[in-house]
Image (spheres, helix red, strand yellow):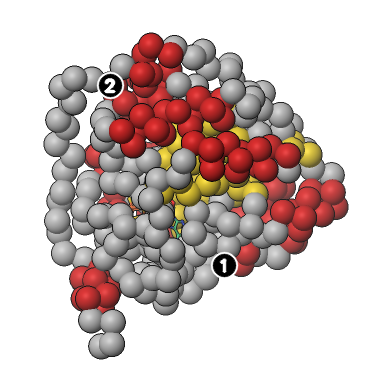
């Protein structure tokens, strides 16, 4: 059984990354089988509970208000809308609902109270509940946990060095602080990143190094292939090659043996055979349903046909952890003096982001 290590070096990870792909897949498949049932895949459904209008400048993101994209903006969903979407997801075999909001950070207000009610509602339907709402304080994370949240998704996206080329409205340290708050609340951590943004192999390995230093390792690591969206600074980026995707999944599998590696955005750009290689190399989870947050995802029936061809089955909820306990009084207790956290705004210049923002202000230019 391979060790769970928190002392990987960048050189070691790069050495693995640069191995011949055929050897790398074989090694990763062995590690995968030692630590997981390779025939079970955890199926999550994404639900965008608040879409667009985000104040951040993440260069890849169609939901950033400053770029000119075609997405439909929406205010926060009602609890009833979430219940109905969760029921559909459950009926189609999803064990987890992941609710995403285009927020910089959570605020202690009525909207957060509504999200807590959504969490409790989906928890009561015996599904794992995940949220991705931006930065959170320790107290906010604890209230989410008390409402029945199982996982919190907050991606570090890339290496610390390359992060500055992608986002200027918050720092890498802010992301790590949120992950620490999530851990203090005893939630499971879902944190990964995106490949295909123009980063180097060193950046990809740097991201894995940061994740491997977290103790414990994140329970889940999403590997997203960039979905280039017209109007964002990365709208013209080339689709990442399938070989890079398989390689990244395999290295993640080897460095974080107990973690669920999530084959995330970018699957519409992949063939069935390409995805099969990702499962072989250690992917143990996907997002199912025709839509991710705002961009397309393979049709549900197509995924089920692929599962059937490969002999894969959807995993039951809470197989890798305990079902959370609800504490109604704790999650309903909104703090009287909301914690005033100073999340950073590094504000360095990213030329392509500035250009994309200007274009948005003068759509006919
Ligand atoms: N606002 C919250 C945040 O940033 O944490 C939650 C939602 S945000 C859309 C969740 C994640 O989706 C991002 O961290 C990023 O990794 C991923 N993502 C966003 N746009 C993407 C794109 N075009 N292609 C691939 N992944 C993307
Ligand atoms: C993650 O790492 N990928 C998901 C989930 N966590 C929230 C989001 C992918 C978003 C892709 C772009 C979109 O659909 O807006
Ligand atoms: Fe906002 Fe999240 Fe998109 Fe960044 S990734 S612009 S924080 S919704």
Q: Position of residue 184 (x, y in %)?
A: 35, 19
Question: Vertical placement of 251 versus 338: above or below?
Answer: below
Q: Is the CB atom of the residue marked by disc 2 within 8 angstroms of ligand 1's nearest atom?
A: no
Res. 243 in view? no
The first of marks 2 and 1 along the sequence is 1
| Disc 1 element | loop
Q: In the rendering, which numbered label is found on residue 334?
A: 2
Q: Which of 240 and 265 is in front in this view?
A: 265
Residue at 25%, 39% in the rendered image = 174
> Can you say which quadrant of the picture contains the N terminus?
top right
Residue at 14%, 36% in the rendered image = 342
Res. 71 in view? yes
Q: In which quarter of the image is residue 89?
A: top right
Q: Position of residue 234 (x, y in %)?
A: 38, 70
Q: In this view, does 208 lie to the left or right of 219?
A: left
Mark nearer the viewer, 2 or 1: 2
């Amino acid at each position: 059984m391979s060790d769970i290590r928190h002392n990987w070096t960048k050189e070691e990870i790069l050495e693995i990354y640069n191995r011949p792909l055929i050897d790398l897949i074989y090694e990763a498949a062995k590690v995968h089988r030692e630590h997981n049932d390779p025939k079970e895949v955890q199926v999550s459904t994404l639900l965008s509970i608040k879409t667009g209008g985000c104040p951040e400048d993440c260069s890849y993101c169609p939901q950033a208000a400053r770029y000119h994209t075609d997405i439909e903006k929406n205010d926060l969903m009602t609890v009833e809308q979430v219940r109905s979407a969760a029921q559909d997801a459950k009926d189609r075999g999803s064990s987890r609902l992941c609710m995403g909001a285009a927020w910089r950070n959570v605020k202690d207000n009525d909207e957060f109270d509504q999200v807590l009610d959504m969490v409790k509602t989906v928890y009561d339907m015996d599904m794992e509940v995940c949220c991705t709402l931006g930065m959170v304080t320790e107290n906010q994370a604890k209230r989410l946990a008390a409402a029945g949240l199982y996982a919190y998704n907050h991606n570090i996206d890339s290496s610390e060095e390359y992060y500055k080329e992608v986002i200027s409205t918050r720092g890498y340290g802010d992301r790590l602080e949120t992950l620490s708050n999530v851990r203090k609340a005893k939630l499971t951590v879902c944190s990964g990143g995106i490949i295909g943004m123009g980063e180097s192999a060193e950046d990809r390995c740097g991201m894995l190094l940061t994740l491997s230093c977290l103790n414990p390792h994140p329970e889940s690591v999403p590997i997203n292939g960039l979905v280039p969206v017209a109007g964002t600074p990365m709208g013209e980026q080339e689709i990442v090659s399938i070989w890079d995707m398989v390689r990244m999944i395999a290295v993640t599998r080897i460095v974080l043996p107990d973690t669920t590696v999530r084959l995330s955005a970018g699957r519409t750009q992949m063939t069935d055979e390409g995805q099969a290689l990702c499962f072989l190399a250690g992917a143990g989870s996907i997002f199912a349903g025709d839509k991710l947050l705002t961009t397309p995802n393979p049709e549900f029936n197509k995924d089920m046909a692929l599962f059937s061809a490969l002999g894969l089955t959807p995993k039951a909820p809470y197989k890798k952890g305990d079902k959370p306990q609800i504490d109604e009084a704790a999650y309903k207790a909104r703090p009287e003096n909301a914690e005033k956290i100073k999340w950073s705004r590094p504000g360095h210049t990213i030329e392509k982001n500035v250009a994309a923002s200007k274009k948005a202000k003068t759509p006919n230019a």
